[in-house]
Image (cartoon, helix red, strand yellow):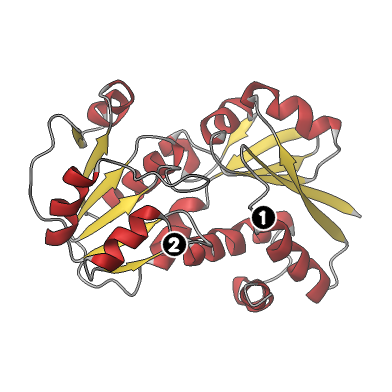
Amino acid sequence: MKLFAIFGDPVAHSRSPLMHNHVFKSLEYKACYTRIHLTDGSKLKETFFALGLSGANVTVPHKEAAFNACDEIRGFAKTVGVVNTLINENGRLIGYNTDADGFMYAIEPFKNVKTILVLGAGGTAKALANRFKNDGIKVTVMNRSAGRLEAFHTQGFKTITWETVELKSYDLIVNTTSAGLDDDKLPAPEKILTPLLKQARYAADAIYGKVTPFLALCNDLGLTSKDGADMLLGQGVLANNYFTNDQFSLETIKKPMQESFLF
């Protein structure tokens, strides 16, 4: 019986155990998936191997710590310095990023997106901004302070703070911050967000399972928006494919994983 888990702080809200365990059961794959509340990201690798895990997912705020913990980084994760999926390969920790492709799956219904404003400057923001850039989308990253924006600026992204924001239109505004996850905060002051959202075509929140203050504001403004459920599904299918060592096709994994959202 293989053991998998998700690391995060907070992590009690995570649907990942339900998703992956339903896939394992449906496909008769001998594995179990659980949650691990980890407050210190520097302990991730130590905890991973102490528990004898075969693989794991990583959520906020440990995705950059997960990158640093790996013995080897593969695929898109090498570009962005952010890992959300870990595999134990013969005692070596291998890191991947499935967030970005999961999000691209989620926003497929949003047509002709050519400009995006990303709110936040953490691990999810790094993954998504670089994925958007790879698709030729113009990306602006906004954060409260300038400190964490330096890495984005170095990579050629336009960056703004709450103090330097300019009122302009974006096709899509994406919240990658944890604002609204377990509080009633917006990712930026309402006086900044409202004018921006009024000129946007779409909005998305990486948080799932609840109407965050950000999504509530979008609804009040009549803006087409969605939460992170489809992103969660998309990245989950890709992660499960790694967990099961490519034993099942993505479509085979997707069906029972979609079913788990009905529970």
Q: In the image, what residue type sits under mark 2?
A: Val
- The front one of 69 and 216 is 216
Residue 205: image x %, image y %?
39, 56
Q: In which quarter of the image is the N terminus?
A: bottom right
Q: Nearer the viewer, residue 171 or 98?
A: 171
Q: Where is residue 130 in the image (x, y as percent from the top left)?
A: 33, 44
Provide the secondary structure element on which disc 1 rests: helix
Pointers 1 and 2 in contact (CB under 8 A)? no
How many other residues sit within 10 Å of disc 2, few (<14), some (14-19) or many (≥20)? Answer: some
Q: In which quarter of the image is the C terminus?
A: bottom right
Give the CA separation, mark 1 to mark 2: 31 Å
Examine the rendering and report whether any part of residue 200 can be seen. yes
Quadrant of res 29: bottom right
Q: Which of marks 1 and 2 is in front?
A: 2
Q: Which image quadrant for residue 22?
A: bottom right
Q: Is residue 162 above or below residue 240?
A: above
Is 208 left or right of 23, judged from the image as shown? left
Tag 2 or tag 1, which sits nearer the N-term? Answer: 2
Q: Which amino acid type is marked by label 1?
A: Tyr
Q: In this view, does 43 lie to the left or right of 233?
A: right
Residue 27 visible here: no
Which residue is painted at 86% across and 52% down in the image?
A: 2
Query: Which residue sits at x=39%, y=44%?
Result: 185
Q: Residue at x 13, y 37 (%)?
A: 165
Q: Where is residue 7 in the image (x, y as percent from the top left)?
A: 67, 40
Extreme-left residue of the structure = 167
On screen, residue 88 above or below 261:
above
Q: Position of residue 187 (x, y in %)?
A: 33, 43
**Total label count?**
2
Residue located beneath label 1 in the image: 242
Q: Mark 2 sits on what residue?
A: 211
